Amino acid sequence: MQTMTSPAVQAQPAQDFLPLNGTDYIEFYVGNAKQSAYYYQAAFGFELVAYAGPETGVRDRASYVLQQNKIRFVLTTSLLPDSDITRHVAQHGDGVKVMALWVDDARKSFEETTKRGAKVAFEPYTIEDENGSVTMAGIYTYGETIHTFVERSNYNGPFMPGFVAKTSGVPQGSPVGLQVVDHCVGNVGWGEMNQWVKFYEDVLGFKLLITFDDDDISTEYSALMSKVVSNGNGFVKFPINEPAEGKKKSQIEEYLDFYHSPGVQHMALITNDIRTTVTELRRRGVEFLSVPGTYYDDLLERIGHIDEDLESVKSLNLLVDRDEEGYLLQIFTKPVEDRPTVFFEIIQRKGAKSFGKGNFKALFEAIEREQGLRGNL
């Protein structure tokens, strides 16, 4: 049964040993960063803002930094056949390696988390150029994923030292209205969810925000369990999923089969006008999961009044849910690569603080239809 913490997570600066300003960037390890960068510019409206590679003195990799409002992606590919990046892509396919957290003091963040049991990814270090300095440190979370603490208050360059400003002329790459990362969802193995919830509570000082069990997130065929943890000010939220017993293979099992370890399943990106954003994403060829038209037959009876015209919501196949604070609209892309692993959620919050519990069944049935087409259900 779904449970909510009470009172809701609130900022407690004096007691927060790991104050976070938000998500600094999300770094993907990919097979071809130049082509991936083009995709995210042309399809999702990101702007190329910085680059590092052989032309800038980096001999082992190339990285493209893309930005849209407060969302920043880094796409990195290896130039060597035997690097950690090459091995990561061979095992997992294109996937998230780093969820970087924006902090005021990277060294203190590293010390506070490692003394509480975090596994060290890399020790704190500072890099400098004519634009100032950036200090970073890293710890591991589930799978091979890393949290990098980024302290950039003394830097005013395009991204960080080692990168140069870069733009591109992707013709259709104008922004689509994406604003900020709302949450990042991790998939972990059987029986591992509580272990990682405890990790975020004990090591990073997060609080349990909400719990969903297999009664909440299930269909006739499959189920999963999920818990959401959040930092003190609510700027960073991480739902963590694990499989649950069902008649057939769940989406979490399919992800683990193809990613070959726990990892980031999807990122939810905020928009202030989901109808305009999704209309443009569809025009550019982004594919979304779909729900049957019958989902909308009693939508207003279930949800209550919404500001949006129901026919436009239905035509775009948007999902709607309500909680005590308001309502939200959301939609999920199909996987954005050939492996059925990483995808995106587009979400507009009209007051709601929840995660669309009322849409879980319709969403999961849509995912199962796609799994069936792939022969993985």
Image: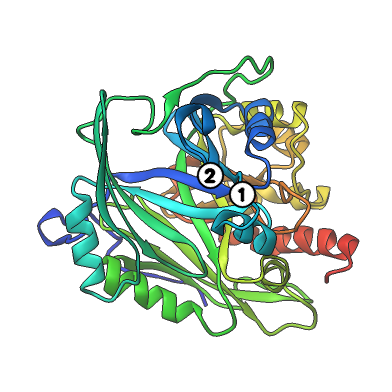
Residue placed most toward the observer, 259 or 334: 259
| Amino acid marked by disc 2 | Asp
Which percent across, then down, holds residue 170?
A: 66, 18
| Amino acid marked by disc 1 | Leu
Earlier along the polypeptide chain: callout 1 or callout 2? 2
Residue 309 visible in the displayed image: no
Which percent across, then down, holds residue 196?
A: 43, 75
Query: SS for tag 2?
Result: loop
Q: Is residue 280 left or right of residue 116?
A: right
Position of 174 relative to 33 (above/below): above
Residue placed most toward the observer, 10 or 89: 89
Residue 79 visible in the displayed image: yes
Which percent across, then down, holds residue 69?
A: 45, 28
Position of 191 relative to 127 (above/below): below
Dot 1 corresponds to which residue?
Answer: 80
For image coordinates 73% across by 76% down, the residue present is 222
| Residue 21 sits in quarter | top left
